[in-house]
Image: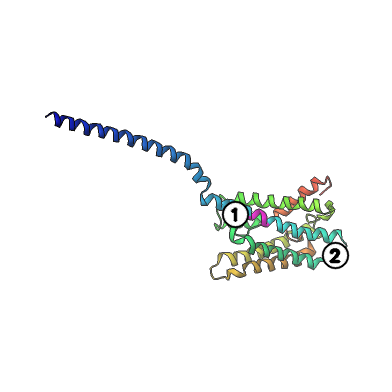
Amino acid sequence: MAANIDGIQEKEMSKMEEGINNIHTSSQSNISRGNTSSAEFCSSPNVVTVAQKLVAEAIGTFFIIFAGCGSVAVNKLYDESITFPGVCVTWGLIVMVMIYSVGHVSGGHFNPAVTITFTIFRQFSWKLAPLYIIAQVTGSILASGTLALLLDVTSKSYFGTLPVGSNGQSLAIEIIISFLLMFVISGVSTDDRAVGQLGGLAVGMTITLNVFVAGIIEIVLLKNISENLKKSSLALRLDEPI
């Protein structure tokens, strides 16, 4: 009888010890989960992917503005050394190169107009649209600052916001070339029947064509929201009238 009582007591003691150990183990696991939750969030593939997209947009816009507006400034400063056709080709080439370089990462917008259009037609997340626009504007401003440091730039070299034609002519040509650009981009990027590998070439050639057609009427060369912000900020930095 005494042996049975001792056995029961030992079993009860062992169960109590197991319960205490389980509580201790669960509390430790909860603490470890709390410590790793923030690390898991920071290393989440979604967060990393968004950061990569924003960096790609900023880098792509930087080099587009650097090469495109740089060709305009060099052509203006050094006696038309590049020539107008050379400026047109430069714009088309740099856009094409950036699309093939980082387009697979971010989609290759490089232009707030493209981002806004895709967002309106539900081809792009409205949550990412403001971040994309910020990245694009940031890249363009950094490019303008770099050009200002490398070249003997004055506000007269950045004459893109001063069209040669009338306001009505500029508005009409802007509507036409903007529609053409978005028509081509939508055709090569949203239609599964399009040849995706040729998308960069098609967009680059469209940019070149737009500059050839619109550049004579309005020296803007490729009207772009980020470009105009960049030019205005540069003129203010140089303390000269826009």
Q: Which residue is found at the position 81% from the left and 53% from the top?
A: 150
Q: Pointer 1: residues within 10 angstroms few (<14), some, or many (20+)?
A: many
Q: CA distance from mark 1 to mark 2?
A: 36 Å
Residue 175 rendering spot, x and y as whole percentages? 69, 61
Where is residue 165 drawn, in percent x and y?
80, 60
User: Whole-percent x and y of residue 159?
Assistant: 81, 55
Q: Main secondary structure of the magenta part?
A: helix
Residue for badge 1: 53
Q: Secondary structure at mark 2?
A: loop
Q: Position of residue 225 (x, y in %)?
A: 70, 53
The amino acid marked with disc number 2 is: Ser
Query: Is 237 part of what is drawn in magenta?
Result: no
Which residue type carries mark 1? Lys
Is residue 57 highlighted in magenta? yes
Quarter-wise, where is residue 200 in the image? bottom right
The residue to which callout 2 is attached is 81
Left or right position of 210 against 125: right
Q: Residue at x 83, y 55 (%)?
A: 157
